[in-house]
Amino acid sequence: MNIHEQYNDIKSRLPEHVQLVAVSKTHPASAIQEVYDLGQRIFGENKVQEMTEKSPLLPKDIQWHIIGHLQTNKVKYIAGFVDTIQSVDSEKLIREIDKEAAKHSRIIKVLLQVKIAEEESKFGLEPEQAKEIFRKYINGDFTNIEITGLMGMATFTEDQDQVKNEFLILKHLFDELNKLKPLQTLSMGMSDDFPLAIECGANSIRVGSAIFGRRDYSK
């Protein structure tokens, strides 16, 4: 299938309430434009450099999401236009986002990334750390950001029971925080596991290769 067919296939499988973030990392602006022309407006990038290179070449109404690990010294390059930072994995980072957002007189939406996978390579807050940051947010810290939800990545494994259990850990935390202050977004699930993620309560998924095809990391 081509990009057009693959995108339409994914969209046809999603319930109406589930947001699709089309993950365009390593793919050219022309591929993003093709998916944009099909109606997609939310695109995710892993790296700041890719986002800042592609953004000027594409329509201004694209909602850009950073979904990869974000270093504090890179926040300033995207603070003027990024819609959502999904990968907030430390209080230091959220304070930097808040500071840079203030410089642009903006409110930047963020998701707290929670570590639910067993893999050491995965980033994320421990659940108690996420709760502590959320409490500070409710109490008035971080006035130029809006915590809209949680994000997590499950372990890369064939064991579907393990993946399901990890997704449910995040859903439980989402429900717990949602009682303190309403949240909008539970972002979990990617090309290989998004149907299970939706089954476990995800209302936002991050899909790249199933839309754009295999990534070329040589570029």
Image (tube, rainbow, N blue to C red):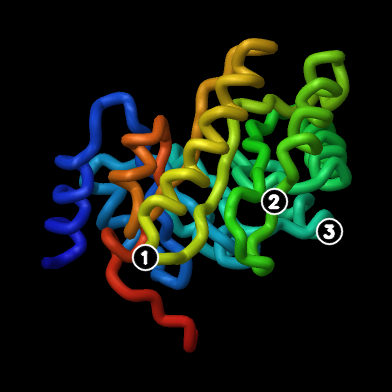
The numbered dot on residue 124 is 2
Q: For numbered disc 2, what is the local secondary structure?
A: loop
Which marked residue is nearer to the observer: mark 3 or mark 1?
A: 1
What crowding class fits label 2: few (fewer than 14 Cα within 10 Å), some (14-19), or many (20 or more)? many
Q: Earlier in the sequence, mark 3 or mark 2?
A: 3
Which marked residue is nearer to the observer: mark 3 or mark 2?
A: 2
**Left or right, 27 with reference to 38:** right
- Can residue 11 be seen at all in this image of the molecule? yes
Give the Cα distance between marks 3 and 1. Answer: 36 Å
Three-letter residue code for mark 1:
Glu
Q: Of residues 169 and 43, which is closer to you in this image?
A: 169
The quadrant of the rendering that contains the N terminus is bottom left
**Left or right, 168 with reference to 103:** left
Q: For numbered disc 3, what is the local secondary structure?
A: helix
Give the Cα distance between marks 1 and 2. Answer: 22 Å
The numbered dot on residue 169 is none
Q: Earlier in the sequence, mark 3 or mark 1?
A: 3
Three-letter residue code for mark 2:
Gly
Q: Position of residue 106 (x, y in %)?
A: 72, 29
Which marked residue is nearer to the observer: mark 1 or mark 2?
A: 1
Q: Position of residue 130 (x, y in %)?
A: 75, 35
Residue positioned 81% across, 31% down in the render: 133
Residue positioned 36% across, 54% down in the render: 160
Q: Of residues 158 and 10, which is closer to you in this image?
A: 158
- Quadrant of residue 112 within the rendered picture: top right
Number of numbered discs present? 3
Residue receiving disc 1: 158
Residue positioned 65% across, 44% down in the render: 113
Q: For numbered disc 1, what is the local secondary structure?
A: loop
Q: Earlier in the sequence, mark 1 or mark 2?
A: 2
- Quadrant of residue 16 within the rendered picture: top left
Residue receiving disc 3: 73
